Amino acid sequence: MSTMNDLRLTGLHARYQFTETIRVPIAVIGTMLFPSLSLLFFVVPQSFAKDAGPATTATAQLAVFAVMSVCLFTYGVGVAEDRALPWDAYTRTLPVGPSPRLIGRLINGLAFIVLGLVPLVLIAWLLTAATLPPSRLGLTAAALVAAEVPLFASGISIGYSLSTKAALAVAQSLLLPLAFAGGLFLPPETFPGWLNLISRWLPTRAGRDLVVTATTGVALPGTTLLVLGGWTLLTGSLALWAYRRDEGRRFR
Amino acid sequence: MEILARTVQATRSYGPVIALDGVSLDVPAGQLLGLLGPNGAGKTTLLQLFAGLRRPTSGTVELFGGDPRDAARRRRLGCTPQETGLPPTLRVHEIVEFVAGHFDHPVPTGELLEQFGLTGLERRQSGGLSGGQKRRLAVAVAFAGRPDLVLLDEPTTGLDVEARHALWDAVRRYHQEGGTVVLTSHYLEEVEALAERVVVIDQGRVRADGTIAEVRSLVPARRVGLRAPDLPDLAGVERSSREGERYELWTADSDSLVRQLVTTGIPFHDLEVATASLEEAFLALTSQSNQTVASVVQEMV
């Protein structure tokens, strides 16, 4: 199939997934609001919120958290839910390969991430000393996308290999440990040595470091890109494998 | 003649359950083929193999000369979602346009909706349609891409008689214009009304394959029903069943059977003579294996 056709189909799938999701707004509002509320309740009242560096870092961390919760829930749980529906099986009979459907989902998730980042950035801008010079905007966006990809692929792997209930349980049990150990709630500088060591190997930590560097300009740890690239490769292959072997929901 | 879809010795199992057991089937261009079988016989699995939704455990499946799991092979294929599984929040025109967007020369939305009696519902969310309207929309999308082969799994389940006949007309029209159809149905009447070729599947195997007349001829042509206290042996009876005083006799020559009945002087009443239907052939073909199942179940108890 031609690349042009694939591109057109990707747009088609992204558009329809967005329309479908936006028509049940309550499903996404929670995921979108939680990071903003965390910023409002846990960062804004603190004294460091008046300090540009830590405030920007805290905002960057919560931005990665926003990305992760969209990935695990809209992709992980959302895909598992879709797979249980006859419509999903039907769309697999249409002349469209895995890429347009998966990339369509990726774009749809990115759109909701942007929607979730808007209140977060507004709160950070209005109520804290966090700053993001326009010159860093493009870099930050790129860093967020790079941080998203392995999380997106994890979500897809969960969604295509588990039932809705199992996907929900796995997403929930991954969300907080990965967020905490990845330094999305407390900066890793406060970690004990052993936790910092583990943290360095996590995709959330690598994503967090990349976004913090992009926003504040602090030096990037040498391992970050390697760890992020490794996770991208691993979760990407897992997602592709899970998608290929999927035959819709299995009843035994 | 071009073969649009084919299985060769296709077997598919789900864990210990064998849904299809070495099925070889050709679907030539222009044919309207009805798949018959009791629930769980393997009909849906067979359609899922053709649509690329499942892989065979062993054997091969071909669609337009290639692997149906390859998206390009499905460009001339039209399917229908099972049950009424349409995304409830999407509008009718959105669903049709989404499906049409996958094909090079789709039927214009308005025209397709008109063919299936859905004009005026374009802006409705599919969740707000009646059961019959959902069913018609689900079948309509199978035709959206001007396919050469359409797979219809229980297309008219849950439709009233009028809607069912309207849908039959649409399927016939498509077939007359050269389209190929594989159809499964719970309604033997439906297969009898539409199909040129009938394939009976039971327990994952093909039990019969032929024209309606050929499959019907697998059982004696006439069924004679009557009430009588007791019947002697009668010549020409190939099969019979009895429930109290009610007898059902199958024979190739009902005229001579009735003559015998009259000459024996037996006091019978409520005489009926009927052409054995496809349903009777179907029951005869699948009852043998059902008895096997029943005896296995009894052994297990």
Image: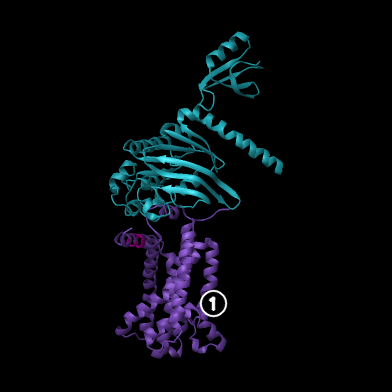
Label the magenta part by its dominant secondary structure: helix
Q: Amino acid at mark 1?
A: Pro
- In this rendering, the answer to whether A247 lies above or below B274 is below
Name the residue nearer the viewer: A25 or A205: A205
Q: Identify the element where label 1 is drawn.
A: helix
For disc 1, the chain is: A
Residue highlighted by disc 1: A177
Q: Which residues are magenta?
A: A10-15
Residue A32 x, y percent position in the rendering: 42, 71
Residue B174 x, y percent position in the rendering: 34, 39
Name the residue nearer the viewer: B201 or A84: B201
Q: Quadrant of residue A71?
A: bottom left
Instruction: Classify mark 1: residues with Cα within 10 Å, few (<14), some (14-19) or many (20+).
Output: few
User: Is B239 part of what is drawn in magenta?
Assistant: no
Rendered-image quadrant of the N terminus of chain B: top left
Residue A62 x, y percent position in the rendering: 44, 79
For image coordinates 47% across by 83% down, the residue present is: A42
Name the residue nearer the viewer: B212 or B55: B55
Residue B142 x, y percent position in the rendering: 37, 46
Inspect this view and state whether residue A39 appears: no
User: Is A14 part of what is drawn in magenta?
Assistant: yes
Name the residue nearer the viewer: B3 or B219: B3
For image coordinates 55% across by 13% down, the residue present is: B256
State which chain is coloured purple.
Answer: A
Q: Is B292 displayed left or right of A34 in the figure?
A: right
State which chain is coloured cyan.
Answer: B
Inspect this view and state whether residue A211 appears: yes
Rendered-image quadrant of the C terminus of chain B: top right
For image coordinates 36% across by 54% down, the residue present is: B72
